[in-house]
Image (cartoon, rainbow, N blue to C red):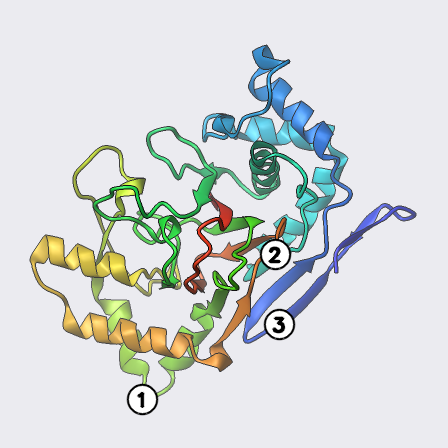
Amino acid sequence: MLGFNDEKDTLYLDEYKEKSLDIVSISGLSNVEWDKVFDSFKRLVEPSAHHKKLTSKLLTETHLSDHLRQVLLGENPGLRKVQSILLRAMSEKKHLIHIRSLGLKYKSADEQAIGFAAISLTMGLPLAADKESGKVVWDVMNRERRSSAYPTFSEGTGEAAYHTDTAFYKWPARYFGLYCRKPAVCGGGVNRFCNAAELRRRLTGDPAYSWIVKTLCETNAIFRVPSSFMKGNGEEFVEARVFDDDIAIRLRLDSIVKGFQLKYGRQDEKLLRAINDFLFLADMPENRIKIKLEEDSAIYINNHEVLHYRDRFTDSARHLMRIWLK
């Protein structure tokens, strides 16, 4: 486990492989002095609001810049120690980076969002989730009463089938993070992860399944962009292959189904068969793991190689935060 050793002033970590997933496990970030991070953030982002409370509304693409990152790192040695671990994990394309406690449990929701964003900023520049405001921290919580032409998984309590985050973008986020403010007390909302890149590789050499790889490599899919991630009304589409050279896996079935239906008025049945068969294999116990995020924990996912799933839950108070990294 990663911890802070007061005598040696060093970090150590636990790395292991499970179901073809390369995982870095971090026990906690006790070496990060969060109040100092918040002071740096307030002074740098909104110096005129010295006596005001911190607000997550400041967490925009504009504010979360390379300059802010460099100053935060310069003023907060705890962040620098964590960054060295996170950047190495990303450079080695680790599939999951699991931080079991950020040390933000008793902070306000705004402070938790800022702390989560600060850790994420050490890894890369965040991508706006809300296209109107430019905010980068997205609240994953129940919004089922809100009217939307095409809601996304993070707005409901139902099952979120295996998918790639931002699959409907021209270039999906390389990594994305989830921070758990409040887990579902009902026991639901559990995540599953599959190394889809490795599964693709294995199927390529299997005569019974190689047709799946061939179909997903050669057939363009039409992804419809969910309403929450568009500016204004209307319909937006992205055309891309599920399997490609640069991005091993880009998949979101509901987006593809809606994309084909709205653009062509029909489905590509062979493509749908290939996707459904691949998803069936991805969820076989030997190909995936389960992780339930606990309060104050976070996980970063290699979004170009790993598919993730969330089962349904009934506790509408469940609240996670999500951030995408370019």
Nearer the N terminus, badge 3 or badge 2?
A: 3
Q: Nearer the viewer, residue 185 or 233?
A: 185
Spot the residue most to the right. Answer: 7
Q: Which mark is residue 208?
A: 1
User: On screen, 130 above or below 9?
Assistant: above
Quarter of the N terminus within the rendering: bottom right
Nearer the N terminus, badge 3 or badge 1?
A: 3
Secondary structure under tag 2 reads: loop
Q: Residue at x 56, y 32 (%)?
A: 110
Residue linked to disc 3: 17
Q: Residues within 10 Å of mark 2 (few under 14, many from 20)?
A: some
* Residue 326 visible from this viewpoint: no
Q: Residues within 10 Å of mark 1 (few under 14, many from 20)?
A: few
The image quarter containing residue 139 is top left
Name the side, left or right, on which 8 lies relative to 104: right
Label 3 – label 2 distance at C-alpha: 21 Å
Residue 228, image x, y percentages: 30, 41
Secondary structure under tag 3 reads: strand
User: On screen, 210 above or below 65?
Assistant: below
Residue 307, image x, y percentages: 43, 64
Secondary structure under tag 1 reads: loop
Q: Nearer the viewer, residue 130 or 110?
A: 110
Residue linked to disc 2: 294
